[in-house]
Image (tube, helix red, strand yellow):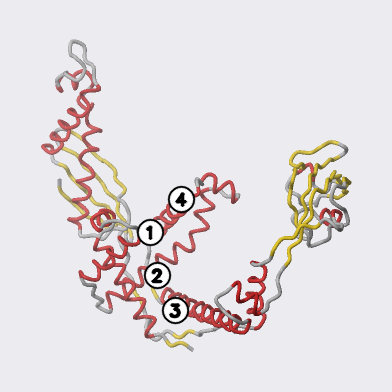
Amino acid sequence: MSLKATNNVETNKYELEIEVSAEQFEEAIQKAYLREKGKIQISGFRKGKAPRKLIEREYGEEVFFEQAVNILYPEAVDTAVKESGLEIVARPEVEVTDVSKAEGVKIKATVFTKPEVEVKDYKGIEVEKEVKTVTDEDVDKQTEALREKNARVITVDDRAAEMGDDVVIDFEGFKDDVAFEGGKAEDFTLGLGSGQFIPGFEEQVAGHNIGEEFDIKVTFPEDYQVEDLKGAPVVFKIKLKGISKKEVPELDDEMVKDATEFETVDEYKADVRKKLEEHAEKHADDEVEGKILDKVIENMTAEIPQVMFDNRVNEMMAELQQRLAPQGITMEMYCKFTGQDIDSVKKAYQEQAEKQVKLRLALEKIAQLENVEVTDDEAAAEIQKIADQYKMKIEEVKQYINEEDVKKDIAVGKAVEIVKNSAVIK
């Protein structure tokens, strides 16, 4: 197996001309025969016992060519890529151009290479930091959430239902005196004022008492999702079976003492404010980093092969599938739920994928320009961290992760710190 030529056909695109000798092809044919002979029946021989020459005479000398080529080409292409010295960024596109016993096999492998990258002005990038001011209203929202969390539900049986109550009802809907699909339920809990049902429904439940049976007249919106019910006047027959209300406690020292680690309302509010301010600071820092890295992308130039963007989109699709799998959701189900197809999901990822690829290339270049070094100890520590995170043995992690790739990731992280530490924050 040998690389005969490396042809640069476009920027970052090469065609490798690869040749496999007749002797090597013959060895592969023999391997293919040994693999396949058990499937072949020749008259006068038990299945799998027919000589190769007899099979080739019966079915043609090319009978094992396809299998032989499949045996040969992965190693031939890998060897050629290494000989070429090219840093490829996608799996080669392989075409077998000639096959014969006398001449061997000729293969053309099309490969895309990592682009040349230029990054300017990545040090001293100027960005503004904007920290959101925490207001009394922000604190009050948090304290209100605490009150809601500690609310208790009280059964009501001495008055009619009011807006703000939760009611338990049986209902069935009719259009032109005919019950319609999906319009019936029993023991349904509805918050009056929640807007869960179509306009006018909840308001007409208010004012009725437990045990009452009554009709409600409403009209479905013109944009309702069920065609037959768009803009249609309907009647719901209702039976009110229960009323309850939520009692929210006052925010006082006693309530705070019972529900939190603090003794007084003032102490609790002070802690809430502190945490909100810390969160605002962290959010501002994240935004600053995002602005800095956006500038890095703006200041980089490279002719990036489309295949790099496509590969990243495919990786993101695979990551989405991994997140969905534990929930028992397939990609087909996800598309149905979100009203999309596979192509539209990929399209939604395209911009993000392009940004990530560009940033990675820029940071790798910066690491090179800054002569960033990563020690074996640093790589080992990172692999140990991954092993601890996934509760795996280091040997198991190394089966899935290449140490050189880990070192590249660490170098990229160091490049980020170089850029951030030199930035001018206003």
Residue at the image position 79 percent from the left and 58 percent from the top: 192
What whole-number distance in Å separates the C-alpha atoms at marks 1 and 3? 23 Å
27, above or below 302, in the image: above
Q: Earlier in the sequence, mark 2 or mark 4?
A: 4
Q: Which mark, by number, is residue 329?
A: none
Q: Tag 1, which secondary structure?
A: helix
For discs 2 and 4, the disc positioned in front in the rendered view: 4
Picture layout, residue 323 above or below residue 409: above
Q: Provide the residue designation for mark 1.
A: 308
In percent of width and height, residue 414 lies at 32, 76
Give the CA distance from mark 3 to mark 4: 31 Å
Quarter of the picture holding the N terminus:
top left
Q: Earlier in the sequence, mark 2 or mark 3?
A: 3
Q: Which mark is residue 292?
A: 3
The mark lying in front, picked from 1 and 4, is: 4
Q: Which mark is residue 359?
A: 2
At label 1, which amino acid type do we have? Answer: Met
**Amino acid type at mark 2:** Leu
State how far apart marks 2 and 4 are (Cα): 24 Å
Badge 4 amino acid: Gln
- 70 horizontally vs 262: left or right: left
Between 303 and 124, the one nearer to me in the picture: 124
Secondary structure under badge 3?
helix
* Label ID, residue 321: 4
Instruction: Name the side, left or right, on which 153 lies relative to 58.
Output: right
